[in-house]
Image (cartoon, rainbow, N blue to C red):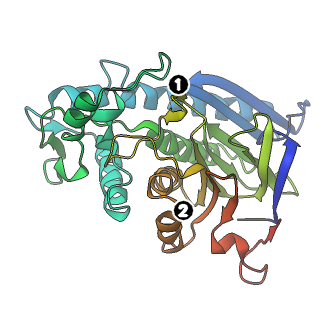
Amino acid sequence: MFGALKALRREPQRTSASPPQVVNAGAWLQREEAIMGTAINVVLWCDDRAQGEAAMDAVMAEMHRIDRTMSPHRPDSALSRINQLAYDEPVPLSDEMYRLLTRAQAFSALSEGAFDITYAAVGQLYDYRAGTRPSPEALAQARAAVGYQHLKLDAPARTVRFGMPGMRIDLGGFAKGHAVDNAAAILRTHGIAHAHVSAGGDSRVIGDHRGRPWSIGIRDPRRPGEMVAVLPLQDVSISTSGDYERYFDVDGERCHHLIDPATGLSPRSVHSVTILADDGLTTEALSKSLFVLGLSKGMALIESQPGVDAIVVDAQGALHFSSGLMAAPTQRSGAVQA
């Protein structure tokens, strides 16, 4: 999964995949579209161009389907229907939505509430474009509606109901992790053995870069265009959560989109968290969990999960690695070179 990891400073930022070189037979193909409020990018190698184009068509169609189903901004989406009705009555769920909500609840329990999709009752009060945050009174009222314990899933009936008035859910990046997982499965069904697919901060590398690992850069959270580390990877999911993605500064404090469900405020002890694991739902949920829990508790959580690793940039700009990334090559398939 991992090659040698190199920690860098002030290196020009590279894209997460090498620029495609398109030829008639055997080609790197690339496509990018704006879907789900972010850039969806696919880079793949194919021996037959038509096969590669069909694979990318299928990936983009799946991204649009998930956006139609799980966007909180579409009034006709399944997610919006849940938010509109679930306090008044049980809302039937598709198998896909039920599985996602079940996994979200499991991650909430694992992280002791640091990951909680019901944070949306508070999250909706922030306007990052306008640079406005809720008043203390509005925040306190919204916090009363936050709590994964009040999200009631009925397994036999396949329904969900909210246990508190004012509750909302937002799958946010969790849906992007799901989308990337589905995209990887689609590419494999199309016979693609070497690919990189990304949706914002969530991505998956399939195979290697035809003889060498994929080079995935982790951006410096305070120096645009620079990286703090380069990860040589293959066959792994990766998610990065950072306080630089959507934010505004007020009175010297940064209000960003990563919200602590317990306080309704933005955590400040770390600047970015990168998680590596076998699937995108795990990487996305744990990146947010570690961000909220902070370095000590967050790393303890990561160390308790087999096959999961983390890289953290703390509030002082220092890099921290989980033990799996620091292990000798005989213990893991890679080592850290600082």
Q: Which residue is mark 2?
A: 295
User: Residue 34 falls in which quadrant of the image?
Assistant: top right
Percent position of residue 28, x then y: 83, 37
Disc tally is 2
Q: Residue at x 90, y 35 (%)?
A: 25
Q: Is residue 110 above or below residue 146?
A: below
* Labelled disc at residue 14: none
Q: Residue at x 66, y 41 (%)?
A: 197
What's under tag 2, amino acid-wise?
Leu
> Residues under labels 2 and 1: Cα distance?
29 Å
Report if residue 152 is visible in the image.
Answer: no
Q: Is residue 58 above or below residue 154?
A: above
Q: Residue at x 31, y 34 (%)?
A: 122
What's under tag 1, amino acid-wise?
Gly
Residue 170 placement, left or right of 291? left
**Front in this rendered view, residue 187 or 8:** 8
How many residues crowd around disc 1 within 10 Å: few (fewer than 14), some, or many (20 or more)?
Answer: few
**Front in this rendered view, residue 296 or 32:** 296
Give the residue at the far front of this rendering.
Answer: 251
Q: Which residue is mark 1?
A: 37
Percent position of residue 69, x then y: 37, 29
Which of pointers 2 and 1 lies earlier in the amino acid sequence?
1
